[in-house]
Image: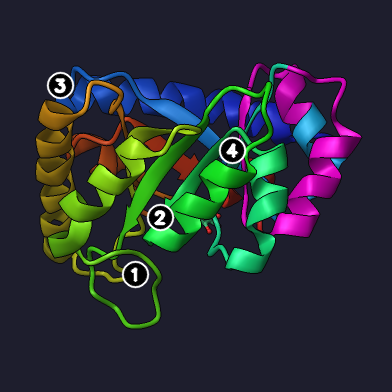
Amino acid sequence: MNTIPKRLDSVYLAIQNCQIDHGVTQSVQLLAVSKTKPAEDIESAYKAGQRQFGENYVQEGVDKIQALKHLSDIQWHFIGPLQSNKSRLVAEHFDWVQSVDREKIARRLSEQRPAGLPALNVLIQINISHEASKSGLDEQELLVLAEKIAELPNLTLRGLMTIGSNTDDDALRQQEFLRMHALFERLKTKYDSVDTLSMGMSGDWQQAIACGATMIRLGTAIFGQR
Ligand SMILES: *Cc1c(COP(=O)(O)O)cnc(C)c1O
């Protein structure tokens, strides 16, 4: 029995209800995080109307992109840590990269983006919790990196991504999400292309929407436990 379409329907509904409950005005996109799940699961979600998918591992993601080429209107987001020796595959196959956190990676992605494809959409990943185990840029360094990215010909700066603290302390996470929202608003005043604040996962997405997220990234809630 396939439960993915049912789970997706209830997620879409829950997002709408959350927007109403919190009186938020921004529209919210759903990124379906399909890491470790087979291409058939993505196809089930696609048939239920989902178009944006997120992958964390380069080779696994590229294999699924190739297996699902016939679903040509999928937008593929790379959301995992990115090493420079893997950047070419990402530049060649994905539509978005949400985990850009240094100039070297940005430069390589722009240089390696094939001519004839639209610019690669990028989000700058911020390490808002300052946890040593997390990748992402320190917020102090945001504007410098944003300026570099805005100059690169084959990238479009679309906004910011973060992973909130893994904590039971809602107040702490709220502080982090609100700081992200303030950074996002500031970036929007500088760059017309900026429209995306990606934050919130299966455990904290309602709070992220209440704090201004325009994109939430859900894996478990759609595809089940990994
Ligand atoms: C795995 C992952 C998600 C989804 O996590 P769930 O808890 O399964 O919803 C979201 N964002 C990133 C960056 C991830 O690596």
> At which x and y percent is residue 76?
64, 35
Return the residue nearer the eye: 174 or 192: 192
Does label 3 or label 2 sit earlier along the sequence? 3
> At which x and y percent is residue 145?
27, 53
Q: Is residue 224 visible?
A: no
Of tags 4 and 3, the one toward the viewer is 4
Residue type at numbered disc 4: Ala
Q: How far apart are marks 4 and 3 (CA)?
A: 24 Å
Of tags 2 and 4, the one toward the viewer is 4
Residue tagged 3: 23
Element carrying mark 2: loop
Q: CB of residue at label 2: within 8 Å of ligand 1?
A: yes
Q: Distance between the residues labelled 3 and 1?
A: 26 Å
Proximity of marks 2 and 1: CB atoms separated by less than 8 Å: yes
Instruction: Return the mark for residue 203.
Output: 2
Proximity of marks 2 and 4: CB atoms separated by less than 8 Å: no
Q: Does the magenta stretch include residue 56?
A: yes
Query: Magenta segment range?
Result: 44-72
Does label 2 or label 1 sit earlier along the sequence? 1
* Badge 4 density bin: few <14, some 14–19, many ≥20, Cα 10 Å: many
Q: CB of residue at label 1: within 8 Å of ligand 1?
A: no
Residue type at numbered disc 1: Asn
Does label 3 or label 1 sit earlier along the sequence? 3
Does label 4 or label 3 sit earlier along the sequence? 3
Of tags 2 and 1, the one toward the viewer is 1
